[in-house]
Image (tube, helix red, strand yellow):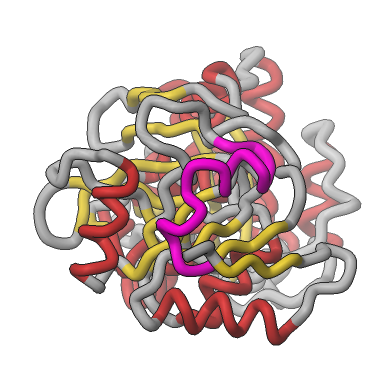
Amino acid sequence: MNTKVLKLDYLKLNPAHLAEAAKALSDGGLVIIPTETVYGIAADALDKKAIERLAKIKERHKDKPFSFLIDTKYKIEEFARGIPVSAYKLIDKFWPGPLTIVLKSKDTGTVGLRMPDDEIALKIIELAKVPVVCPSANISGKPAPINFDQAIKDLDGLVDLAIDAGSTKLGLESTVVDLTVDPPKIIREGAIKKEEIEGVIKKKIILFICTGNSCRSVMAEGLLKKKLAELGRKDIEVFSAGLTASSFGATAETTDLLIKEGINMSTHRSRAVDKDLIKKSDLILVMERLHEERIMRFAPEVKNRVFLLKEFAKINDNNLNIEDPIGRPADFYAKTFATIKQAIERIAAIL
C-alpha cells in the first residue's frame, strides 16, 4: 500500500493538511515532513511502537537515540538539565535554524534538540502536541533527502503519511554540537560552519542590571565598553538592563558624566531584563542585593554567575549596595559614578 501524500505550498498553507499530518503523528503514525535542511521522518517519541518502526525503517541500532524537533526554544528545559551558557548563546544566534545541540537529558544519557526554521515542520509539531523525534528520511548510510522525490523513493509504503513541499531551503544537514563536554565538540559540521559555532561560544557576555536601566547600569556598560575597546578586546559583548525598565534614555546626569569620560550613550534606550538575556550571560553584575534576589527568584540556575558590582571596587565598607542616584544631587551621582568606575577597572583587568 502506497503512502498517502499531501502537497503543501509555503505561500498558502492548507490548514486541513497540516492538521491531518499532526493527527497522524499523534496517533502513532510515521510522517515524512520537510525542514529547511533535509526531509525527516517524524514520530511521537512516547509511542514505543512508532519508535520501533522508525528504528527498523532507518536500520538503526535501538541504542542510538533520535534527536527531537521542538517548535519553541523554551521547551529545551522540558527535555534537558544542567543546560550550559553556551547552549543559550547558540540558541539565541542560530534558532530557529540548522543547529542540533546535544545536552544532558532529564533522566540519564543525552538528548539532541533542534528548532527548525520551517513553517510546515513547526506547525505540525505544535498541532501534534507530542514530543517529536525526526531523523532524516533515508535509510542509514544513504544520502539525506533534500527534496520530496528523494525522501519518498525508499520509504513509499513504509510510512503512513508524507508531506510534499518540494525542495528544502538549504539542502544541507544541521550542524550537531555536543555541549555535554568541555570544550564543546562538533559532532557533525553541516549548514553552520565550525568557525561560526566556536565564535559564538567563545564570546563572553557581560550583563549589568539595575532598577530602571537609566543610570547605574548605563554608567557601567559605557565604562566597560570603553575599557575593552582600549584593550583591543573584541571577544566580549556588554549589555545593560533594568528590572522595571521601559523605553527611555539615560538620565541627563548620567549622560554628562559619561561624556566627560569620552563616552557617548545618547542613543541608549532602557530595556527590561528577561530570561533569555540572563541565561546567555557569562557574568551578571547587579547594583543591589534586591536585584540579586529578584534574579534568583525567576532564574535560580544562574546563581553562580551573579555578583554585586561593588564587590569589585576597593572600598572598605560593609554596604555592598550601589544606591540609586535618581533624584539625588550631582555630588551623589559623581560618587556613584566613581565607585562604578573603580569596579569596572578591576573587572576589565580580570576578564
- Image quarter for residue 9? bottom right
Q: Residue furthest top?
A: 232
Name the residue at 89% across, 65% down.
Answer: 11
Out of 270 and 169, give the one closest to the viewer. 169
Magenta region includes residue 184: no
- In depth, the one of 340 and 54 nearer the eye is 54
Q: Nearer the viewer, residue 235 or 44?
A: 44
Residue nearest the observer in this picture, 126 or 322: 126
| Residue 52 drawn at (x, y percent) | 21, 58
Residue 84 can be seen in this image: yes
Q: Position of residue 220 (x, y in %)?
A: 61, 46
Residue 338 shows in the view:
no
Q: Which residues are magenta?
A: 145-161
> On the rendered image, what quadrant is the C terminus found in?
top left
Number of numbered callouts drawn? 0
Residue at position x 65%, y 72% from top? 212
- 144 horizontally vs 169: left or right: left
**Is residue 91 positioned above or below 342 on the image?**
below
Would you identify the image quadrant in which residue 13 lies? bottom right
Q: Residue at x 37, y 58 (%)?
A: 133
Q: Is residue 149 above or below residue 198?
A: below
222 horizontally vs 131: left or right? right
Determine the residue positioned at 74% across, 61% down.
330
Residue 277, image x, y percentages: 54, 57
Q: Residue furthest left?
A: 108
346 lies above or below 294: above
- From this viewpoint, which residue is outermost toward the front? 1
